[in-house]
Image (cartoon, helix red, strand yellow):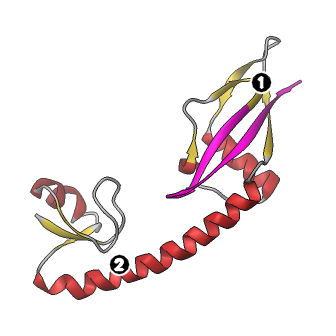
């Protein structure tokens, strides 16, 4: 079934694209949730308009992401956590804690889903963490986990 996407859908396409998807996926997920419209011959103008606005929005978002990347490049973010005598944390440091620490220390708001973390940090010390601010704008920061007394 051909559909016109009204918003970006991971693994399917971007806003304004006319894509071919399984009929059940379109009827049960995309159409009821307002993520797509059933494509017909008259949608070419609407699709072009959606792509144009998407491109303008992407250009603005890319510039904002590059500015954030410049501000975060080489940053060291300190996070305090309770730890045992051997340096092992009682809990763990995940994307939520990293994002809130960046917001508190640098004043930059980042979505927690943008943090690329293979596994939560579970020990005291320094770790490198990548943050994907936009499709091709990735910045690495250093997270310093400090034992809390």
Quarter of the image holding residue 65? Answer: bottom right
Q: Which mark is residue 124?
A: 1
Residue at 78 percent of width and 20 percent of height: 83
- Can you give x and y, in whole percent of width and height, for residue 73 in the image? 74, 53
- Can you give x and y, in whole percent of width and height, for residue 66 in the image? 64, 65
Closest to the camera, between mark 2 and mark 1, is 2
Quarter of the image holding residue 86? Answer: top right
Q: Tell me: 100 left or right of 39.
A: right
Earlier in the chain: of badge 2 and badge 1, it is 2
Examine the residues drawn in magenta and state their main secondary structure. strand
Quarter of the image holding residue 9? Answer: bottom left
Q: Is residue 136 above or below residue 51?
A: above
Give the residues drawn in magenta, as a range: 127-149
- Other residues around mark 1 within 10 Å, as few (<14) / some (14–19) / many (≥20): many
Mark 2, residue position: 51
Q: Tell me: 35 left or right of 84.
A: left
Q: Is residue 138 visible?
A: yes
Which quadrant is home to the N terminus? bottom left
Residue lying furthest top: 86
- Other residues around mark 2 within 10 Å, as few (<14) / some (14–19) / many (≥20): some
Q: Is residue 108 visible?
A: no
Residue at 13 percent of width and 67 percent of height: 2
Q: Is residue 140 above or below residue 45?
A: above
Looking at the rendered structure, the secondary structure element under dot 2 is helix
Q: Is residue 35 above or below residue 89?
A: below
Q: Nearer the viewer, residue 3 or 35?
A: 3
Residue lying furthest right: 149
Looking at the rendered structure, the secondary structure element under dot 1 is loop
């Amino acid at each position: 079934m051909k559909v016109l996407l009204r918003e970006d859908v991971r693994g399917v396409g971007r806003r304004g694209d006319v894509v071919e998807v399984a009929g059940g996926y379109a009827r049960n997920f995309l159409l009821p949730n307002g993520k797509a419209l059933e494509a017909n011959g008259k949608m070419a103008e609407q699709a072009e308009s959606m792509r144009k606005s998407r491109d303008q929005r992407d250009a603005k978002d890319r510039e904002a992401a590059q500015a954030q990347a410049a501000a975060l490049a080489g940053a060291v973010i300190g996070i305090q956590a309770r730890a045992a005598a051997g340096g092992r944390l009682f809990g763990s440091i995940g994307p939520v804690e990293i994002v809130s620490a960046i917001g508190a220390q640098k004043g930059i708001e980042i979505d927690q889903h943008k943090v690329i973390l293979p596994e939560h940090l579970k020990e005291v010390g320094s770790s490198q963490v990548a943050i994907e601010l936009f499709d091709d704008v990735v910045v690495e920061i250093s997270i310093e986990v400090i034992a809390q007394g």
